[in-house]
Amino acid sequence: MESYAEVFNKRKQNYFSKLRKNIWVLNKLIDDNKENIDENAKRTLEILLDPKNYDELNLAEALYSITFDMMSLMNRLSDGTVKEIPFEENDGIKLFIDIINKLKNKCKTENVTMTIEPTAKMIYGFLVGFAEDTEGTIMYVADKTGFDLEDDLQMQQFMLYLEKAQTIFNSKSNKKNSVNEMPSKKDIEELTKFSNEFHKLCEDGKLKKGIKRSLSNSYTIHFL
């Protein structure tokens, strides 16, 4: 029977193999954390590059998986190989509409909650909706939040609320590529569950063929 150390080292080497095969993911993670010069980013890079125990390895694998799936998703969206999500069925878009309406009506947004499985669906839907059909998504959200985009003033007001909604969305989703201290086992378990749920959505949403499209739009997704 293999010892604890042998099992850990074998799994760690498998993790390193994934990093070597997909060095672009590692470079993305490194670049994200190099932008920060604080101890949080340094600590994150240490965990990503050389996890010392199972907690650190679980955390590193989850961060790798999330980044890999998000970058792969964006590439597939540009190739048109992602299944469309109808606006009325897109949980991410529906949450955006809810947040903007709350902001407009001066309602508190603290009660906007996102648990593991819905969070994965919301983030996936948000990315697919805004990246796949930016103009159509913006027009749909504007209509559902009562803004007339043909009115220059209302258009600027809408864009302001859209940016605010994304800030709130990101804070609620708690998607981070850096850690300020070693998360608890529960936090790591939740991040792992999220990465698994998000991976499943990405796999289920794949199409074999599609139409090449550009993702360079006037509205930028500030998430990756």
Image (spheres, grey):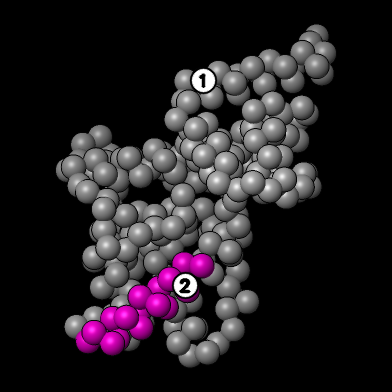
Q: Would you say residue 13 sits in the magenta stretch?
A: no
Q: Is residue 5 visible?
A: yes
**76 in relation to 215, above or below:** above
Instruction: Name, please, the residue furthest toward the bottom.
Output: 105
CA–CA distance in space, label 2 to label 1 = 37 Å
**Neighbour tally class for label 1: few under 14, some 14-19, many 20 plus, Cα within 10 Å:** few
**213 in relation to 49, above or below:** below
Residue 196 sits in quarter: top right
Q: Would you say residue 160 sits in the magenta stretch?
A: yes
Instruction: Name, please, the residue furthest toward the top.
Output: 1
Q: Which residue is mark 1?
A: 20
Q: Which secondary structure type mostly characterizes the magenta part of the structure?
A: helix
Over which residues does the magenta segment extend?
Answer: 151-167
Residue 152 sits in quarter: bottom left
**Whole-percent x, y for residue 210 in the image:** 20, 41
Relative horizontal placement of residue 55, taking residue 27 as reference (left or right) = right
Residue type, numbered disc 1: Arg
**Whole-percent x, y for residue 63 in the image:** 59, 40
Circles 2 and 1: CB atoms closer than 8 Å = no
Relative horizontal placement of residue 38, taking residue 99 as reference (left or right) = right
Q: Is residue 183 visible?
A: no
Residue type, numbered disc 2: Ala
Q: Which residue is mark 2?
A: 165
* Nearer the observer, 86 or 133: 133
Mark 2 vs 1, N-terminal side: 1
Q: Residue at x 19, y 83 (%)?
A: 150
* Nearer the observer, 202 or 36: 36
Q: In the rendered view of the protein, which quadrant contains the N terminus?
A: top right
